[in-house]
Image (cartoon, rainbow, N blue to C red):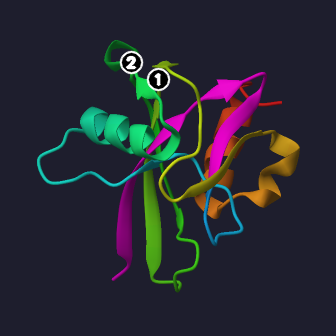
Amino acid sequence: MKKEIDKLAWLYIQDGKLLSARSKDKLLFYIPGGKREAGESDEQALTREIKEEISVDLMPNSIQYAKTFKAQADGKNNDTVVKLTCYFADFQGELCPDAEIEEIGFIDYQDKHLCSLGTIKVMDWLKSKGLLH
């Protein structure tokens, strides 16, 4: 039986590039977000995680479900998959790495090799929708 890591992810695109984050001591970029805590809705958990990781406030009325993806989890053995439930949302504040995040940046499709497998799956979908360059 495969183990599943259940994560929420925020899709924010600017100029055809996807906002991505890299944790301290990690090589690959991933889509900002994280895991829900007990009793949290997707929107509450995503808003809290984004505030912790990159210091901005998601605007609750703008949060829209995009799609859910599954991929091999980075740094885990083959019996672990990550499930990314992705949302689009607007924000207020200034994007700034915080907590365990070392670096944030906008990654274009040509640079997807810098990203986690789950992020690459999402980027392929966004590209197919004409959202990434």
Q: Amino acid at mark 1?
A: Ala
Secondary structure at badge 1 equals: loop
Q: Amino acid at mark 2?
A: Met
Residue at 57% from the left image edge and 47% from the top image edge = 31
Which of the two residues, 78 or 25, is positioned nearer the viewer here? 25
The residue tagged 2 is: 59
Residue at 85% from the left image edge and 49% from the top image edge = 111
Write down the region rendered in magenta. 1-21
The residue tagged 1 is: 89
Q: CA distance from mark 2 to mark 1?
A: 7 Å
Task: Give the percent coordinates (x, y) of residue 130.
Answer: 74, 24
Nearest to the eye among marks 2 and 1: give it. 2
**Which residue is the extreme one toward the top?**
61
Q: How busy is the neighbourhood of tag 2: few (under 14 within 10 Å), some, or many (20 plus)?
A: few
| Above or below for 68 versus 12 | below
Q: How busy is the neighbourhood of tag 1: few (under 14 within 10 Å), some, or many (20 plus)?
A: many
Do labels 2 and 1 touch, CB within 8 Å? yes
Question: Is residue 18 found inside the magenta-colored segment of the image?
Answer: yes
| Above or below for 124 versus 128 | below
Residue at 58% from the left image edge and 79% from the top image edge = 75
Which of the two residues, 62 or 55, is positioned nearer the viewer here? 55
| Above or below for 116 versus 72 | above
